[in-house]
Structure formats: structure tokens, C-alpha cells
Amino acid sequence: MHHKGFILWFTGLSGAGKSTLAEQLLAQFKSSGYRVELLDGDEIRTNLSKGLGFSKEDRDTNIRRIGFVARLLARNGVIAITAAISPYRQIRDEIRALSDHFVEVYVECPLDTLIERDTKGLYQKAIAGQIEHFTGISDPYEPPLNPEVTVHTDCESVSDSVARIEQYLMDHDLIGDP
């Protein structure tokens, strides 16, 4: 099945649901016969960005690397899904400018909901000062100003969010009707 490659770039705070949505879409695209890869922030850190810390400079380098790999994939007709916090607007916009088809999905969830959920216990640690450079607590997060899609994971189901993302992609001829 031939289709255009594109980048589906998830951004949002830790625990907002980026990976959950990305994995769901990955499974659906695969079952529809699309060529698709998921670039997960943690995996990239382990394999491609070993030795990088969480300073602004290191984060920017990590995100640029993710963007570079995503562009290579998209250029070759693959749907490249990225799920990394990618806190800085300028770097996301830089990747967008270098890409042919870049779809930014803002996974929006209020900080107090995330602190309440705190599935991994990271927010408590960050608030207690045990984790430095924690996005949203001790480090900035710059939400996108004009994302292609915004999903509100505090008040909509995973399937609703996924359906809205797919609808956008169909409306813009990036994927076919299911």
C-alpha cells in the first residue's frame, strides 16, 4: 500500500498520555498495512543519545536527533510517530520547517491532574526536589501555539483522542479512509 510519509509529533507533559496514544495509532496503522515506526523518547535516549543529560542543550540535541530520524523515515514513505516531551517550541518549529508533512499533536492535560495521577511517582519526587530539570515543575514546558490537533486527555477517552487524530489525517489526505 503506497502512502505519503509524514511525521506525527506528539508533545505534552510527562504522563499526559503521549505514549498511550502513539502506541494505539501505531497498532492501527500497522493493521491497515501502513509502514510505520514509533520513536519513543526513552528508547532514543538509550540508543541514539547515550550520555546526554537533561540540560536545555542536551534536550535540544536529543529532540533534533529524533527529528532527524523521523525526517529520514517520512522521506521514505514511512509514518514516523514521535512520543517525547519535546518541551521547547523553537526546536519543534525548527523540525517542522525542515519537514514536508509535520503534524503536531498537543497532548494537553492540566498539571494538577498529572500530579494527581502521577502513575510513576515522578511528580512527587520532582516537587520534593529529588529530580532536577523536571518538565512542568522545575523546567519549562512551552505548549504549541498552533498544533494541528489538540487532545484533552483529562476529559476525553483514548479512543476519542485517537479518532480525532485519524480524522485530521484523513481530512488532509495523509491516510486513506479505514
Image (cartoon, rainbow, N blue to C red):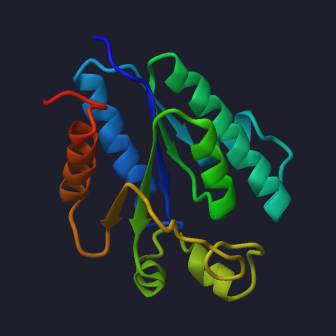
What residue appears at the point 45 percent right and 22 percent down from the top-left corner? 78
Q: Where does residue 74 sit, x and y in percent of width and height?
A: 50, 26
In this view of the protein, which residue sits in the foreground, 41 or 118? 41
Q: Is 11 rendered above or below residue 122?
A: above
What residue appears at the point 60 percent right and 23 percent down from the top-left corner? 72
Q: Is 149 rendered above or below residue 30?
A: below
Instruction: Check the image and name the residue furthest to the top.
Output: 1
Q: In which quarter of the image is the N terminus?
A: top left
In this view of the protein, which residue sits in the foreground, 127 or 152? 152
Judge left or right: residue 145 versus residue 71.
left
Task: Give the image quarter of residue 31.
Answer: top left
Instruction: Check the image and name the residue furthest to the left.
Output: 178
Q: Quadrant of the C terminus?
A: top left
Task: Give the image quarter of residue 153.
Answer: bottom left
Q: Where does residue 88 sit, x and y in percent of width and height?
A: 66, 63
Q: Is 161 rendered above or below residue 74?
A: below
In this view of the protein, which residue sits in the foreground, 18 or 80? 80
Q: Is 108 rendered above or below residue 69?
A: below
Judge left or right: residue 6 versus residue 137.
left
What residue appears at the point 38 percent right and 22 percent down from the top-left corner? 4
Q: Where does residue 32 sit, x and y in percent of width and height?
A: 22, 23
Q: Where does residue 167 sit, x and y in percent of width and height?
A: 20, 46
Tally of numbered tags: 0
Judge left or right: residue 94 versus residue 130.
left
What residue appears at the point 67 percent right and 76 percent down from the top-left corner? 140
